[in-house]
Amino acid sequence: MWHITESVPRDYAVTATALETERLAQPPILVFHAVEGIGVPVVTNLFAYRERIAQAIGTTAAGIHRHWAEVSQSLIPPVVVAHGACQDVCLIGEQADATRLPLMAHFGEDAGRYITSGVVVAKDPDHGWGNLSYARMQLRDRRTFGISLHSRGHLWDYQKRAEARGQALEVAVVIGMHPAFLIGAASRVPIEVDEVDIVGALLRHPVELVPCRTVDLSVPADAEYILEGVIEPNERAKEGPFGEYTGYATDRSTNNLFSLRAVTHRASPYFLDVCPGASKDHLSLSSVQREADLLARLRQSLPNVQSVHYPVSGTHYHCYVAIDKKRPTDARHAALLVLGLDPYVKLVVVLDPDIDITNESDVLWALATRMQPREDTFIIDNMTCNILDPSSSGGASSKLAIDATRPESWAAARLTLPDEAMALARQIAQARLSGDV
Ligand code: MN
């Protein structure tokens, strides 16, 4: 964790520093203690390092998919308690002023200052099911934000149904909480499953909630900040452009309007920012869950699939798969399954189990030495894709599959070193890296 005590400008500096640290093997959590015009510490980069994501949910990076599959089978519902630190300070009605929140601009192309880490709590207007989800929120004035539901998830569905009856949809925005809360909120579960039950499963204890002051919802008692309010029916407010996960600014937005009713926060809060754009912080926050789900579904058809990975460089559009082939055609079969199961994926590369699919140099080396373009690739035209891909048209894209596994008949021997030599080399290197020599 880096404590940054020097003064930095309010806009862009937090994002720039987070991106600067991405080249490090272990990108640190950043705590800015002196952002100009902001009187509270700003925390970012929480999710930029995969081992830290694993730690937050009680496992290791190597075991994270198996852990996710196990834990998400045993949901733990929350409990409601009377008091919570998130309501140490309550600013209700006219006292609630969004312009006094510690918000910043992230990229030069952004339309304004944004909340990037906000987890939106809402209730299904027909069934009462709970929901957690993410929505980018652009500050407009003291009492309103533009909010985009463009991912068309459960919150979008709730809002459409409330709006059809002319009703405002009550929501509460959670800013800053245990990282497992943000990881659970990014999970993809059926509409009737409340993501907060996944969070409980990840934490292995029920999330403690407190009732909101102005809306009929409950929020995590330990959160740093809560914004209570409603998404207005039949009103729209221009929102965007904003730096999306693709690495491009986009004004694709549902342009909904959030009206603020209350701000509550801890007595001495930290403000959490998720670095937006195609950052490790942003992309890694949702890739573990997607990988675990995809792996489980692939294994239903091909139990010899060993692991899957969405590399940060591919912004959710590239997928690497490791398989222990039992038949020469298994790799192509796996590739076709991935393209069918995840419409975001545009390039799938299937690799042998000796390749570390989380290491892009290793993946490219396999492409260089085990793949023949004519025999080992295929393209499928006119498939569903994610509409934010700037190279796509009208939500359609062609897809490329590459079999980078080696043929069974292959004689080339991969170079190896004896285990003792490798262990000695690690000792020599580690001693110098830690400054012991
Ligand atoms: Mn949901």
Image (cartoon, grey):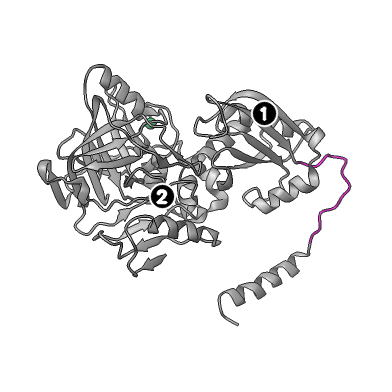
Residue 371 spot, x, y in % from top left: 79, 41
Q: Earlier in the sequence, mark 1 or mark 2?
A: 2
Q: Main secondary structure of the magenta part?
A: loop
Where disc 1 sits, the SS reads helix
Answer above or below: position of 404 versus 51.
above
Q: Residues within 10 Å of mark 2 (few under 14, many from 20)?
A: few
Identify the mark at residue 105; answer none if there is no mark. none
Q: Which residues are magenta?
A: 405-416
Residue for badge 1 = 336
Q: The C terminus lies in which quarter of the figure? A: bottom right
Q: Is mark 1 within 8 Å of ligand 1?
A: no
Tell me the kind of residue under disc 2: Gly
Tell me the kind of residue under disc 1: Leu
Q: Is residue 343 magenta?
A: no
Residue for badge 2 = 108
The nearer-to-camera label among 1 and 2 is 2
